[in-house]
Image (cartoon, rainbow, N blue to C red):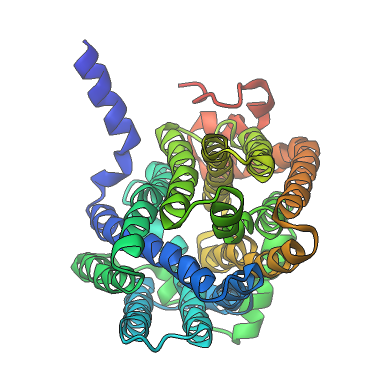
């Protein structure tokens, strides 16, 4: 009986893979994301090796993410207007070019900090378009609507599974042959996702043929839709707060690795891997869920865990405790983001999906540059540990406020599920979430 149960559990966990296009996407992205994490770790270590400055780490983080804040809403309009697959092919090709240029600068020995800043800005522009388009493209790849939540969780699982592999490989390569090889491998890894996108067979979608109006009119329409509806607004504000005050811990990890834990590139890689391990566990759990029952309350629990993990890392001078703390923080952060993403994607009107997901991208990625810049500057004034403690306290406050609004969120979301004809348990799930254990799969 045991093998049957295990096989059934695996089928539930991976049920979105029955869609051919999504299988191709997972195969390509899984390879590409390992390269992406390798580049991110190698770039952070390169900047700190060249400068020894926590402030410049914040500057590089700022330049790589500020385009998301400025340009993602425009990308959302394009995602609702044009063919999303073609747009993704363009963005992935440009990201491959950026990695190749970075590799050339490092391997030729001419790299300077300003080169890294400019190339980070270029990648930031590419990501500002790529991320919201890719988020809204998921619904086109999944043929079974009830698999959408599972697909979103599996997306996060891919990202965090790559975090288990990429940073460790990067740490070993940086210590042995230098950062340049990491950038070369990342550039090559984009070929996998480009091949997957070209191989997909997609049916035409109505939003690509709808009447177009002025881009600013459509942007305003999407903004009014997103922020005029309480549940969407509350989710976006919570994610924005976490991104602004909590996520910048990542830019200070090299400082803790070298100055607090007295380690090197290996230590940095292990710390990033620990965070990825916790995040991976969280997204695997979400992928195993059969509905959105309890996701509102789970978002609160995840935010609290994230705050506790960051605080623990801030006060730790022991490698083992630091690894555990970052694992807890990783679990909390990605469980929160994936839960909020799932709720949003389930309740959105499809003709506004690209625009709302662009606002979600702004909240998650677009606020991070301000957090990275602020964390780098604050760390130079009050020190890295105190900086992280301030961020953890703000995240905890956000969890409390969101928890107080949960009853109103459930009340407004339930009629949408009923109207959309989603399975009955989901229609009742948000309303009854307070009665469910925070880590329950919900009723069958």
256 vs 373, left or right, is left
Residue 127, image x, y percentages: 47, 73
In the image, residue 435 sits, relative to residue 332, either above or below, namely above
Q: Nearer the viewer, residue 285 or 314?
A: 314
Q: Give the residue at x 33% y 79%.
A: 103
Q: Nearer the viewer, residue 370 or 292?
A: 370
Q: Residue furthest front?
A: 262
The C terminus, quarter of image: top left
Q: Nearer the viewer, residue 269 or 143?
A: 269
Q: Give the residue at x 52% y 35%.
A: 320
Q: Nearer the viewer, residue 4 or 53?
A: 53
Residue 370, image x, y percentages: 69, 69
Residue 195, image x, y percentages: 20, 69
The answer to which quarter of the image holds residue 365 is: bottom right
Q: Residue furthest top?
A: 1
Residue 220, image x, y percentages: 69, 76
The answer to which quarter of the image holds residue 315 is: top right
174 vs 390, left or right, is left
Q: How many marks?
A: 0
In the image, residue 302 sits, relative to residue 24, either above or below, namely above
The N terminus, quarter of image: top left
């Amino acid at each position: 009986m045991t093998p049957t149960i295990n096989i059934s559990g695996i089928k539930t966990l991976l049920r979105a893979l029955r869609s051919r296009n999504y299988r191709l996407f997972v195969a390509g992205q899984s390879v590409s994301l390992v390269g992406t994490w390798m580049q991110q770790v190698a770039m952070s270590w390169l900047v700190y090796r060249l400068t020894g400055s926590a402030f410049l780490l914040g500057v590089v983080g700022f330049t790589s993410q500020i385009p998301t804040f400025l340009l993602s809403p425009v990308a959302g309009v394009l995602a609702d207007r044009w063919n999303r697959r073609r747009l993704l092919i363009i963005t992935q090709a440009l990201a491959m070019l950026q990695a190749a240029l970075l590799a050339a600068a490092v391997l030729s020995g001419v790299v300077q900090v300003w080169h890294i800043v400019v190339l980070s800005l270029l990648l930031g522009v590419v990501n500002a378009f790529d991320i919201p388009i890719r988020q809204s493209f998921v619904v086109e790849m999944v043929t079974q609507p009830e698999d959408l939540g599972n697909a979103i969780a599996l997306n996060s699982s891919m990202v965090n599974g790559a975090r288990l592999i990429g940073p460790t490989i990067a740490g070993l390569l940086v210590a042995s042959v230098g950062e340049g090889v990491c950038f070369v491998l990342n550039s090559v890894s984009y070929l996998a996702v480009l091949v997957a996108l070209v191989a997909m067979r997609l049916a035409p979608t109505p939003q690509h043929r709808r009447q177009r109006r002025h881009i600013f009119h459509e942007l305003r329409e999407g903004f009014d839709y997103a922020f005029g509806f309480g549940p969407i607004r509350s989710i976006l504000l919570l994610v924005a707060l976490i991104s602004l005050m909590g996520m910048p811990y990542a830019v200070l990890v090299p400082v803790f690795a070298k100055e607090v834990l007295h380690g090197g590139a290996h230590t940095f890689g292990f710390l990033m891997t620990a965070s990825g391990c916790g995040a991976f566990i969280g997204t695997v759990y979400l992928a195993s869920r059969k509905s959105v029952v309890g996701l509102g309350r789970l978002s609160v629990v995840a935010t609290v865990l994230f705050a506790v993990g960051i605080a623990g890392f801030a006060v730790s001078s022991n490698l083992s405790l630091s690894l555990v703390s970052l694992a807890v923080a990783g679990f909390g952060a990605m469980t929160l983001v994936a839960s909020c993403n799932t709720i949003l994607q389930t309740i959105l009107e499809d003709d506004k999906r690209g625009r709302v997901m662009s606002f979600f991208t702004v909240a998650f990625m677009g606020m991070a540059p301000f957090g990275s810049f602020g964390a780098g500057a604050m760390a130079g004034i009050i020190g890295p540990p105190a900086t992280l403690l301030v961020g953890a306290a703000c995240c905890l406050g956000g969890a409390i406020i969101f928890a107080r609004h949960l009853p109103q969120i459930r009340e407004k979301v339930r009629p949408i599920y009923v109207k959309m004809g989603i399975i009955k348990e989901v229609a009742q799930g948000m309303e009854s979430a307070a009665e469910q254990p925070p880590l329950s799969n919900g009723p069958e």
